Image (tube, rainbow, N blue to C red):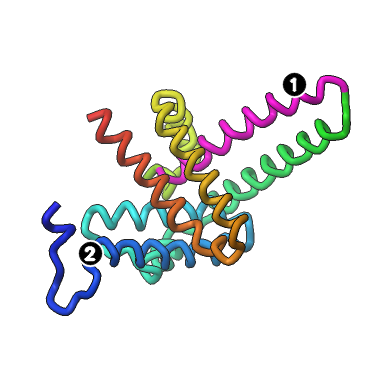
Amino acid sequence: MSDMSAREPGEVFGPRMTLFADMLSVGLATALVCLPVVTIPAAVSTACAVLRGAGEGQAATAGRYFAALRRRLRAGDLTAGAVALAGALLFLADLALAGAGLPGAPVFAVVAAGLGAAALVVGLRACARPESLTDWSAAVREAARDAVRDLGGSALVLLAVATAALCAWMLVPLAFLVPGPLALALTAVHVRQGTEIE
């Protein structure tokens, strides 16, 4: 704890503020990489990896983020993005059908919302797993297990998403900074689960 409060000579704010600034720069870089939409899983996964590295003494900078992204971007990442996009479009179509006044629409909307929330949690927890850097299917399998074994962590992921969405809704320019805190929250949930298992 003393390491986190110690300041280097000439340092104004201390290491915690430096990590906060680095997280925001990684978040801004992530937001830019997310713009093509199919790159969202790779972008968030890379942000989580860079922020996880900060806990191991590595720099969490936008430069390191882009270097890690260049090394890992592959066809599997774009496939994961296409699958996520297709799932999101299917979810929105289901909600539109439920809103059209079909019989049983309220029950269908609740079931669809529950399935959508579960898929979102598994997808985001997969991005936080180290396996996502090389094997998305393994990351998704492990994330699904994590989501069931660690219900508290899954609730924290949903809370982080709700907070990020609320911040972006209240002040639209914050949408470009939101990926950093969201990736930090996902990484913290993953690290928290690992320490609880140990």
Percent x, y of residue 150 = 39, 27
Sequence-first tag of 2 and 1: 2
- Identify the mark at residue 107; answer none if there is no mark: 1
Q: Of the residues shown, which amino acid type is indicated by label 1?
A: Val
Q: Residue furthest front?
A: 170
Q: Are marks 2 and 1 in contact (CB under 8 Å)?
A: no
The residue under the point 34% across, 62% down is 20
Q: Residues within 10 Å of mark 2 (few under 14, many from 20)?
A: some
The residue under the point 43% across, 52% down is 183
Point out the image quarter for the C terminus. top left
The main secondary structure of the magenta stretch is helix
Q: Residue furthest bottom?
A: 10
Residue bounds of the magenta highlight: 103-128
Q: Residues within 10 Å of mark 1 (few under 14, many from 20)?
A: few
Q: Of the residues shown, which amino acid type is indicated by label 2?
A: Pro
The question of residue 125 being in magenta is answered with yes
The residue labelled by disc 2 is 15
Relative to 119, is 27 on the left or the right? left
Q: Mark 2 and mark 1: span between their CA atoms?
A: 50 Å
